[in-house]
Image: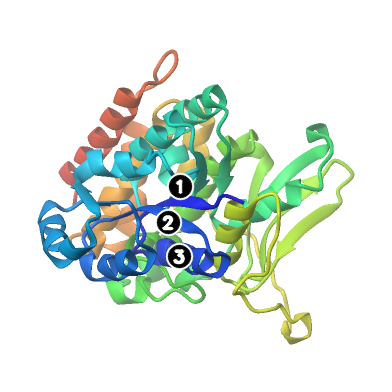
Amino acid sequence: MYNNLSILGSTGSIGTQALDVARLLGLNIKALTANSNVGRLEEQMREFKPEFVAVTDENAAKDLKVRTADLGIEIDTGMDGLCRAAAWDSADMTLNSVVGMVGLTPTLAAIEAKKEIALANKETLVAGGSIVTAAAKKNGVNILPVDSEHSAIFQCLQAMHDKKTLKRLILTASGGPFFGKKIDQLRNVTREQALNHPTWSMGGKITIDSATMMNKGLEIIEAAWLFDMKPEDIDVVIHRESIVHSLIEFCDNSVLAQMGLPDMRIPIQYAITYPMRYPSPVGQLDLAKCVALSFYTPDYETFKCMSVCKEAIRKGGLFPAAANGANEKAVELFLAGKIGFTDIGDLVEAAANAQSRTQGELTLSQILDADKAAREFVETHIK
């Protein structure tokens, strides 16, 4: 068990649930970060007494310093503060639950400081998979998945004695709020409809990614890096009930699945306590109450973001970073009412196709430049 945690994105959905786990297990919180939710962050500071806090938004940081002057806790701002929290000396694990490309640099900072990584930030591996995995190997750092699907695969893999016997990874997807719809039915989707997820309670960006199925495309890329698998050996299946969280298939065609109630505190806790298990705050799964477990083939044509991501990881290089950056910008524009729902997939596809191939090993600078260029591409190609 990792007893001393730094939690990046502590006021978000994953961050607050991580603190539920820390509270239950009596863990020490050494550092916390947030973007601008100083009200919730102040509550967390008063309860967990971290040594260090970082707030991305500078005005919010000023407000927090006034609110918490009596605590004597150091508060920093911006990316520098985020990286300081990620590499905080007295923490032995950094849980990265920030949303978006902003999570890449602090993940690298934590790895360079030889902190174990509990990873809930998909973009770290989507955009920077090659440099992140290389840095982790160099520094002897484990990257433990927190996403429910990747945690499920990771848990199933504990039963594997020889990597050569592994045939396929199968990621499950809820299908989002528009399961079964065709492209013509999605052109006039509203912001409110897209944010109405049938199973999970998540932030706006991740919820839209679920509605477009981009999240599953990102998870394919992430799984390829996490588990050293070829993209053609990673499949997706729609599972509406969200009870089976993902599966692995062996060379003899036997399949193992990880199941449980749809509650993120199980994968969060398993990353923190790995390789041990402890009682969790999550309810017990009653199979007798599961009337049916259904599975469907994804619609790659309607939800083209998945296809774009599969092609991006197949091409490699900067293509995944371009697809991710374009998506982040397109989702931002959709939530602001500036583009339509189906424009997201079109823009992601166009931006990924505009990315040129690269030679040799990637650098962080190249990845950040590709991300920036893809965002600019989206802004200049709005209909």
Q: Secondary structure at mark 3?
A: helix
Q: CA distance from mark 1 to mark 2?
A: 23 Å
Q: Amino acid at mark 3?
A: Leu
- Front disc: 3 or 2: 2
Say whether residue 168 is left or right of residue 322: right
Disc 3 from disc 2: Cα separation = 8 Å
Residue 40 placed where, x, y %? 28, 70
User: Contact, CB < 8 Å: mark 1 with mark 2?
Assistant: no
**Residue located farthest toward the right when viewing the structure as drawn:** 252
Which residue is identified by label 1?
122
Q: Earlier in the sequence, mark 3 or mark 1?
A: 3
**Rendered view: 310 above or below 140:** below
Relative to the observer, which residue lies in front, 28 or 87? 28
Q: Which residue is mark 2?
A: 29
Residue 83, image quadrant: top left
- The residue that label 3 is drawn on is 19
Foreground of the two, 146 or 168: 146
At which x and y percent is residue 189?
Answer: 32, 71
